[in-house]
Amino acid sequence: MGLGVAVLGTRAGKRRRWRAPRPAGAPRDCLRSRSSLELVEQTVGFGQEKKATCLLNSLWSCGLLGGYGTCCPFFPLGENINICWSPDGQTIAVGNKDDVVTFIDAKTHRSKAEEQFKFEVNEISWNNDNNMFFLTNGNGCINILSYPELKPIQSINAHPSNCICIKFDPMGKYFATGSADALVSLWDVDELVCVRCFSRLDWPVRTLSFSHDGKMLASASEDHFIDIAEVETGEKLWEVQCESPTFTVAWHPKRPLLAFACDDKDGKYDSSREAGTVKLFGLPNDS
């Protein structure tokens, strides 16, 4: 059994389907596109098809048994900057540059709800129980809404500057936020209090990802490395070296395998051309 299939969207509207190899213990290039990769998401489990969305507001679907998928276009939502799936795989939330979050039914591809916010909306996410919706904002706060009612529950002052990203751990114990202050904060889901901070990055934190068992947290920024920390202690487990700033990181849903995409340039023909490369890093078996 392989490590699964991922579908990715790019600015050019092209999609790629890729079956991951086994961990190799070192970064390696796995996919190339003619443009930068954005808004990569997929559902895992539930016996459903795996899906992903791209910048052009299209839903790509690929069957579990192989073969390229099809694109199911729906109405334009503006220039999208963030996207997430509900834990039950039934709904997609898309946030655009106008600070509008649209909730889309994954089966009918129709809008279920739309919310306009009066603050800068950054990364968005449901909690693991699917009954609350979290937004990070430009004021350094975490806004929590009830779901599906979308009624305000609480606003938490999480960081002194722009709160950029948020991720929940698969075990449902913690969630993490990353900020322009270069700090990663770890929060207790039940108490909604910060229990730990990670401060090894020097630039604004762009992306976060918990490992499948919730024991490791990867974080990245414009620093030319990805920090992999032990969640319970905050200690550094690994530092993945990169040649350029990192756009996004994502752990495999079942194994210690990290995928990441950086601002790589294809210097062979044009030094300004984006390489569109996805790389893999597999931790040693004894880690």
Image (spheres, rainbow, N blue to C red):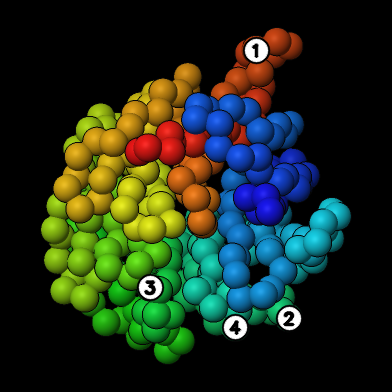
Identified by mark 3, the residue type is: Asn
Quote the CA–CA distance across marks 4 and 3.
19 Å
How many angstroms separate mark 1 from mark 3 (CA)?
41 Å
Q: Where's residue 229, x and y in %?
A: 28, 42
Check disc 3 and report its element: helix, strand or loop.
Answer: loop
Q: Which circle marks residue 112 in the picture?
A: 4
> Marks 4/2: CA distance?
10 Å
- Read off the residue under disc 1: 267
Q: Quadrant of the C terminus?
A: top left
Q: Disc 4 marks which amino acid?
A: Lys
For residue 127, which numbered disc appears in the image?
3
Compared to 253, does 32 lie above or below?
A: above
Q: Which residue: 71% across, 46% down?
A: 19
3 or 2: tag closer to the N-terminus:
2
Of 248 and 20, which appears nearest the observer?
Answer: 20
Q: Closer to the camera: disc 3 or disc 2?
A: 3
What type is the residue that disc 2 sits on? Thr
- Say which quarter of the image contains residue 89: bottom right
Disc 4: CA contacts within 10 A as few (<14), some (14-19) or many (>=20): some
Left or right position of 92 against 201? right
> For the point 51% across and 56% down, which residue is it?
254
Residue 263 visible in the picture: no
Question: Quick one: label 1 or label 3, which is nearer the N terminus?
Answer: 3
Q: Position of residue 242 (x, y in %)?
A: 45, 23
Q: Secondary structure at mark 1?
A: loop
Q: Where's residue 83, x and y in %? A: 53, 60
Identify residue for label 2. Answer: 108
Q: Residue farthest to the bottom?
A: 149
Quarter of the view holding residue 51 = bottom right
